[in-house]
Amino acid sequence: MTSAMQSDKYTVETPEVVTIEYVVAGVASRCLAATVDTTLILLLQATLSLVMVPLASSNDFGTIILALWATLAFALLWGYYVSFEMLWSGQSPGKRIFGLRVMREGGRPLDFSAAVIRNLVRIVDFLPFGYGLGVMVMFADHRARRLGDLAAGTLVIREDYPLSLEQIARGLAPVVVPPRNSAAPASPLLPNLHQVGPDDYTLAEAFLQRRETLHQDERRLLATELANALRMRLDLPSDGDPERFVEHFVREYRIFYLVRQA
């Protein structure tokens, strides 16, 4: 899997040669989301204080209660983000309002370890006050990442674009082609695959995805035209079942892609 950054775009190319494009969240939208989350945290901490402080002043165990209050306040500050980002797949209330989401680099969904790391480092990002250091780092980084994102290997993207490879996989059923023979070599069985490109693969896969919805005559015609075009690009003779050849091409191009990326 490869990825690239161009302007505010973040692109991921999957092993199936499908390119997915995300838009990286800017500093302004992230600051607005952080403002909402910080306000909610302060309200929760104020509510906790209204309960714990009077209880401590009227109780023989006041020191212990105050220590518990401080511990809970810190847990709330740190656990707020981790809990919501795990519950809502990379979103806190502020991020949800402004259409943002955290994901790992490469388009992978946020996991628990990455959420913990990025939010533990949040304390450093907050220095000297009001996310001062974090905002400076976001302005300097070409993906608008703060220190927590750099440490955890995460970035924040806009929700109105694809969210993760996992979610996209749930929306698009993968093309299933007959498996290779167990005795087949690790290299592709088709020659000259370097003479075709991702567009050819995408076209072939799109046909296989939609073929069951086509009329029999239309399906046969499209399969023949596509197979003949691919064989011409690959310098192969035009014989054999066209639809089986398209399946064979998709399977072997995947192998070719993986070998090329190795």
Image (tube, rainbow, N blue to C red):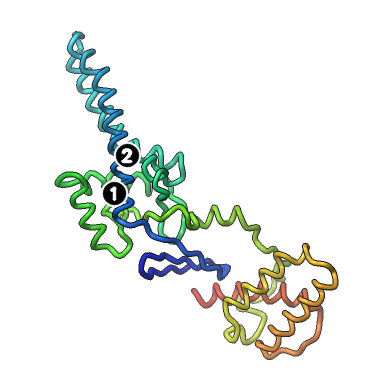
| Amino acid type, label 1 | Cys
Q: Which residue position holds label 2?
A: 37
Furthest residue toward left: 128
CA neighbours of label 2 inside 10 A, class few (<14), some (14 to 19), many (20+): some
Q: Quadrant of residue 154?
A: bottom left
Cα separation between marks 1 and 2: 10 Å
Label 1 secondary element: helix
Q: Where is residue 262 in the image (x, y as percent from the top left)?
A: 49, 74
> Count of labels shown?
2
Q: Residue at point 19% right, 44% down?
A: 130
| Amino acid type, label 2 | Asp
Label 2 secondary element: helix
**Which label sits on residue 31?**
1
Q: Please indicate whether residue 65 sits to the left or right of residue 83 in the image.
A: left
Q: Please indicate whether residue 141 sits to the left or right of residue 246 in the image.
A: left
**Which label sits on residue 128?**
none
17, above or below 55, in the image: below
Q: Residue at point 56% right, 70% down?
A: 17
Q: Please indicate whether residue 206 sits to the left or right of residue 3 in the image.
A: right
Of residues 187 and 80, the one nearer the viewer is 80
Q: Residue at point 42% right, 53% down?
A: 103
Q: Position of residue 197 (x, y in %)?
A: 58, 80
Q: Where is residue 89 in the image (x, y as percent from the top left)?
A: 46, 45
Closer to the chain start, of discs 1 and 2, is: 1
Of residues 248 and 167, the one nearer the viewer is 167
99, above or below 257, in the image: above
Q: Where is residue 226 in the image (x, y as percent from the top left)?
A: 72, 79
56, above or below 246, in the image: above
CA neighbours of label 1 inside 10 A, class few (<14), some (14 to 19), many (20+): some
